[in-house]
Image (spheres, rainbow, N blue to C red):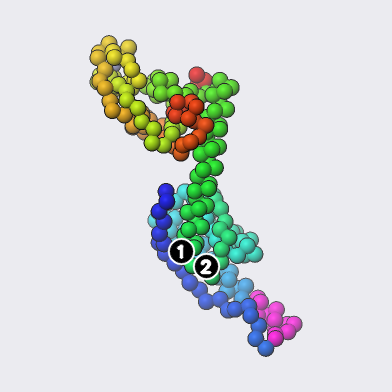
Protein backbone atom coordinates (compact mmCIF):
# COMPACT_ATOMS: atom_id res chain seq x y z
CA UNK A 1 0.00 0.00 0.00
CA UNK A 2 1.14 3.57 -0.60
CA UNK A 3 2.68 3.13 -4.03
CA UNK A 4 1.01 3.74 -7.32
CA UNK A 5 1.95 4.15 -10.95
CA UNK A 6 0.28 4.64 -14.29
CA UNK A 7 0.12 1.39 -16.29
CA UNK A 8 -1.72 2.48 -19.40
CA UNK A 9 -3.71 5.28 -20.95
CA UNK A 10 -6.32 5.81 -23.61
CA UNK A 11 -7.28 9.02 -25.37
CA UNK A 12 -10.20 9.75 -27.68
CA UNK A 13 -11.18 12.95 -29.41
CA UNK A 14 -14.60 14.06 -28.30
CA UNK A 15 -15.97 17.27 -29.82
CA UNK A 16 -16.46 20.15 -27.43
CA UNK A 17 -19.92 21.12 -26.22
CA UNK A 18 -19.05 24.79 -26.56
CA UNK A 19 -21.29 26.25 -29.23
CA UNK A 20 -19.74 28.69 -31.61
CA UNK A 21 -22.00 31.10 -33.41
CA UNK A 22 -25.03 29.91 -31.41
CA UNK A 23 -26.48 26.65 -32.69
CA UNK A 24 -30.22 26.52 -32.36
CA UNK A 25 -33.01 23.98 -32.07
CA UNK A 26 -32.66 20.96 -34.30
CA UNK A 27 -28.99 21.60 -35.15
CA UNK A 28 -28.09 21.93 -31.48
CA UNK A 29 -29.75 18.60 -30.63
CA UNK A 30 -28.00 16.90 -33.51
CA UNK A 31 -24.63 18.10 -32.22
CA UNK A 32 -25.45 16.95 -28.70
CA UNK A 33 -26.27 13.48 -30.02
CA UNK A 34 -23.06 13.46 -32.01
CA UNK A 35 -21.04 14.27 -28.86
CA UNK A 36 -22.92 11.65 -26.82
CA UNK A 37 -22.07 9.02 -29.44
CA UNK A 38 -18.40 9.94 -29.19
CA UNK A 39 -18.52 9.73 -25.39
CA UNK A 40 -20.30 6.40 -25.48
CA UNK A 41 -17.64 5.11 -27.81
CA UNK A 42 -14.89 6.34 -25.52
CA UNK A 43 -16.42 4.70 -22.43
CA UNK A 44 -16.81 1.48 -24.38
CA UNK A 45 -13.14 1.54 -25.34
CA UNK A 46 -12.17 2.40 -21.76
CA UNK A 47 -14.25 -0.52 -20.44
CA UNK A 48 -12.65 -2.94 -22.89
CA UNK A 49 -9.17 -1.69 -22.06
CA UNK A 50 -9.87 -2.04 -18.33
CA UNK A 51 -11.01 -5.60 -18.92
CA UNK A 52 -7.81 -6.32 -20.85
CA UNK A 53 -5.83 -4.99 -17.86
CA UNK A 54 -7.89 -7.15 -15.52
CA UNK A 55 -7.15 -10.28 -17.55
CA UNK A 56 -3.44 -9.48 -17.27
CA UNK A 57 -3.32 -8.35 -13.65
CA UNK A 58 -6.35 -9.85 -11.85
CA UNK A 59 -6.97 -6.94 -9.52
CA UNK A 60 -9.49 -7.06 -6.67
CA UNK A 61 -10.62 -3.48 -6.50
CA UNK A 62 -11.60 -1.09 -9.25
CA UNK A 63 -12.15 2.65 -8.86
CA UNK A 64 -13.53 4.66 -11.74
CA UNK A 65 -13.39 8.35 -12.33
CA UNK A 66 -15.49 10.52 -14.59
CA UNK A 67 -17.84 13.45 -14.37
CA UNK A 68 -20.78 12.56 -12.14
CA UNK A 69 -23.24 13.05 -15.01
CA UNK A 70 -21.55 10.28 -17.07
CA UNK A 71 -21.56 7.58 -14.41
CA UNK A 72 -24.83 6.07 -15.59
CA UNK A 73 -23.49 5.91 -19.16
CA UNK A 74 -20.19 4.35 -18.17
CA UNK A 75 -21.11 1.74 -15.55
CA UNK A 76 -23.44 -0.45 -17.68
CA UNK A 77 -20.63 -0.88 -20.21
CA UNK A 78 -18.37 -2.67 -17.73
CA UNK A 79 -17.83 -6.42 -17.91
CA UNK A 80 -19.60 -8.23 -15.01
CA UNK A 81 -16.18 -9.19 -13.55
CA UNK A 82 -15.33 -5.51 -13.39
CA UNK A 83 -18.69 -4.50 -11.94
CA UNK A 84 -18.13 -6.98 -9.10
CA UNK A 85 -14.85 -5.28 -8.28
CA UNK A 86 -16.03 -1.72 -8.57
CA UNK A 87 -15.34 -0.27 -5.13
CA UNK A 88 -15.61 3.44 -5.65
CA UNK A 89 -16.05 6.42 -7.90
CA UNK A 90 -13.48 9.18 -7.99
CA UNK A 91 -14.71 12.71 -8.41
CA UNK A 92 -12.62 13.58 -11.39
CA UNK A 93 -12.68 14.34 -15.08
CA UNK A 94 -10.35 14.31 -18.02
CA UNK A 95 -9.02 17.77 -17.18
CA UNK A 96 -7.37 16.49 -14.00
CA UNK A 97 -3.68 15.63 -14.20
CA UNK A 98 -2.54 12.02 -13.94
CA UNK A 99 -0.76 12.83 -10.68
CA UNK A 100 -3.93 14.19 -9.16
CA UNK A 101 -5.96 11.16 -10.20
CA UNK A 102 -3.33 8.74 -8.85
CA UNK A 103 -3.24 10.64 -5.57
CA UNK A 104 -7.04 10.50 -5.29
CA UNK A 105 -6.89 6.75 -5.96
CA UNK A 106 -4.40 6.19 -3.14
CA UNK A 107 -6.51 8.23 -0.75
CA UNK A 108 -9.62 6.25 -1.62
CA UNK A 109 -7.77 2.96 -1.22
CA UNK A 110 -6.50 4.04 2.21
CA UNK A 111 -9.97 5.10 3.33
CA UNK A 112 -11.66 1.89 2.13
CA UNK A 113 -8.95 -0.33 3.63
CA UNK A 114 -9.34 1.40 7.00
CA UNK A 115 -13.12 0.92 6.83
CA UNK A 116 -12.74 -2.72 5.85
CA UNK A 117 -10.30 -3.39 8.70
CA UNK A 118 -12.52 -1.64 11.24
CA UNK A 119 -15.47 -3.78 10.12
CA UNK A 120 -13.37 -6.95 10.35
CA UNK A 121 -12.12 -6.09 13.86
CA UNK A 122 -15.67 -5.30 14.95
CA UNK A 123 -17.08 -8.56 13.61
CA UNK A 124 -14.36 -10.54 15.40
CA UNK A 125 -15.01 -8.70 18.67
CA UNK A 126 -18.78 -9.23 18.35
CA UNK A 127 -18.24 -12.95 17.76
CA UNK A 128 -15.91 -13.15 20.79
CA UNK A 129 -18.29 -11.26 23.04
CA UNK A 130 -21.24 -13.45 22.25
CA UNK A 131 -19.08 -16.55 22.73
CA UNK A 132 -19.49 -17.62 19.14
CA UNK A 133 -17.12 -19.11 16.62
CA UNK A 134 -14.02 -17.11 17.48
CA UNK A 135 -11.03 -17.06 19.80
CA UNK A 136 -8.46 -14.42 20.71
CA UNK A 137 -4.96 -14.28 22.14
CA UNK A 138 -1.91 -16.18 20.92
CA UNK A 139 -2.39 -19.23 23.10
CA UNK A 140 -5.98 -19.95 22.10
CA UNK A 141 -5.34 -19.13 18.47
CA UNK A 142 -2.40 -21.57 18.32
CA UNK A 143 -4.41 -24.27 20.04
CA UNK A 144 -7.10 -23.98 17.36
CA UNK A 145 -4.63 -23.56 14.53
CA UNK A 146 -2.71 -26.72 15.54
CA UNK A 147 -5.88 -28.76 15.38
CA UNK A 148 -7.21 -27.36 12.08
CA UNK A 149 -10.00 -25.46 13.79
CA UNK A 150 -9.26 -22.05 12.32
CA UNK A 151 -11.25 -20.67 9.43
CA UNK A 152 -9.46 -17.33 9.19
CA UNK A 153 -6.67 -15.72 11.13
CA UNK A 154 -6.89 -12.04 12.04
CA UNK A 155 -3.82 -10.26 13.33
CA UNK A 156 -2.41 -6.88 14.04
CA UNK A 157 0.16 -5.71 11.50
CA UNK A 158 3.77 -5.73 12.78
CA UNK A 159 2.88 -7.93 15.75
CA UNK A 160 5.56 -10.40 16.80
CA UNK A 161 6.26 -12.59 19.83
CA UNK A 162 8.59 -15.40 20.86
CA UNK A 163 7.26 -18.91 21.07
CA UNK A 164 8.07 -22.58 20.76
CA UNK A 165 7.50 -25.33 18.24
CA UNK A 166 7.55 -29.12 18.39
CA UNK A 167 10.24 -30.59 16.09
CA UNK A 168 8.19 -33.75 15.66
CA UNK A 169 4.57 -32.76 15.03
CA UNK A 170 5.30 -29.07 14.26
CA UNK A 171 2.58 -27.84 16.59
CA UNK A 172 3.10 -24.25 17.67
CA UNK A 173 3.11 -23.13 21.31
CA UNK A 174 3.53 -19.97 23.34
CA UNK A 175 5.45 -21.53 26.22
CA UNK A 176 5.14 -25.34 26.30
CA UNK A 177 8.63 -26.69 27.02
CA UNK A 178 7.50 -30.21 26.24
CA UNK A 179 5.04 -31.03 23.48
CA UNK A 180 1.89 -32.35 25.17
CA UNK A 181 1.19 -34.51 22.13
CA UNK A 182 4.60 -36.09 21.41
CA UNK A 183 6.28 -35.61 24.79
CA UNK A 184 9.45 -34.30 23.12
CA UNK A 185 11.25 -31.09 24.03
CA UNK A 186 10.05 -28.09 22.03
CA UNK A 187 12.37 -25.61 20.32
CA UNK A 188 12.38 -21.86 20.75
CA UNK A 189 11.32 -19.73 17.76
CA UNK A 190 12.04 -16.02 17.37
CA UNK A 191 8.62 -15.13 16.05
CA UNK A 192 5.67 -17.37 16.70
CA UNK A 193 3.36 -14.93 14.91
CA UNK A 194 5.32 -15.38 11.71
CA UNK A 195 5.21 -19.17 12.21
CA UNK A 196 1.47 -19.07 12.76
CA UNK A 197 0.96 -17.19 9.49
CA UNK A 198 2.97 -19.86 7.67
CA UNK A 199 1.02 -22.64 9.36
CA UNK A 200 -2.23 -20.92 8.43
CA UNK A 201 -1.25 -20.53 4.79
CA UNK A 202 -0.11 -24.17 4.64
CA UNK A 203 -3.55 -25.15 5.88
CA UNK A 204 -5.20 -22.87 3.29
CA UNK A 205 -6.51 -20.68 6.09
CA UNK A 206 -7.14 -17.07 5.13
CA UNK A 207 -4.86 -14.54 6.88
CA UNK A 208 -6.12 -10.99 7.37
CA UNK A 209 -4.20 -8.06 8.81
CA UNK A 210 -5.43 -5.09 10.77
CA UNK A 211 -3.43 -1.89 11.12
CA UNK A 212 -3.01 -0.82 14.75
CA UNK A 213 -4.38 0.82 16.76
CA UNK A 214 -7.57 -1.19 16.58
CA UNK A 215 -10.11 -3.04 18.71
CA UNK A 216 -7.93 -6.12 18.31
CA UNK A 217 -5.29 -4.58 20.61
CA UNK A 218 -7.43 -5.35 23.67
CA UNK A 219 -7.64 -9.01 22.62
CA UNK A 220 -3.96 -9.83 22.44
CA UNK A 221 -3.48 -8.50 18.90
CA UNK A 222 -4.46 -11.81 17.35
CA UNK A 223 -7.69 -13.70 16.91
CA UNK A 224 -9.33 -16.24 14.69
CA UNK A 225 -12.69 -17.12 13.29
CA UNK A 226 -13.30 -20.82 13.82
CA UNK A 227 -14.76 -23.58 11.73
CA UNK A 228 -16.76 -24.76 14.71
CA UNK A 229 -17.91 -23.23 17.98
CA UNK A 230 -15.10 -22.78 20.56
ZN1 LIG B 1 4.67 -32.59 19.06
Residue 152 in sight: no
- Image quadrant assignment for residue 180: top left
Q: Are marks 2 and 1 in contact (CB under 8 Å)?
A: no
| Residues shaded magenta | 22-33
Q: Residues within 10 Å of mark 1 (few under 14, many from 20)?
A: few
- Image quadrant assignment for residue 31: bottom right
Q: Which mark is residue 164?
A: none
Q: Is residue 9 above or below residue 148?
A: below
64 in magenta: no
Residue 9 in sight: yes
**Gap between marks 2 and 1 measured at Cα:** 8 Å
**In which quadrant of this rendering is ligand 1 seen?**
top left
> Residue lying farthest front?
213
Residue of label 1: 99
Q: Residue at x 48, y 26 (%)?
A: 219
Instruction: Judge from the rendering whether residue 26 lies leftward or rightward of residue 157; answer left or right.
Output: right
Q: Residue at x 48, y 36 (%)?
A: 213
Determine the main secondary structure of the stretch shown in magenta.
helix
Give how far across and how far down residue 146 sits, in percent: 37, 22
> Residue lying farthest bottom?
21
Residue of label 2: 96
Q: Residue at x 52, y 67 (%)?
A: 96
Q: Residues within 10 Å of mark 2 (few under 14, many from 20)?
A: few
Give how far across and how far down residue 107 sits, in percent: 50, 53
Q: Residue at x 54, y 70 (%)?
A: 95
Q: Secondary structure at mark 1?
A: helix
Instruction: Judge from the rendering whether residue 35 lies leftward or rightward of residue 153; answer left or right.
Output: right
Q: Is residue 3 above or below residue 153?
A: below
Amino acid sequence: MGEISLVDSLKSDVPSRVREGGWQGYESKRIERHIDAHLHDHFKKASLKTFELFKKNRFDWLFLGCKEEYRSDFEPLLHPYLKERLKGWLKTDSNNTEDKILKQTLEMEKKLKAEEEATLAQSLVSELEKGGRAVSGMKEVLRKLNTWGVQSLVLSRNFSAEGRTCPKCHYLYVDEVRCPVCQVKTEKVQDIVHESVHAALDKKVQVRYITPPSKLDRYGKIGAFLRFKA
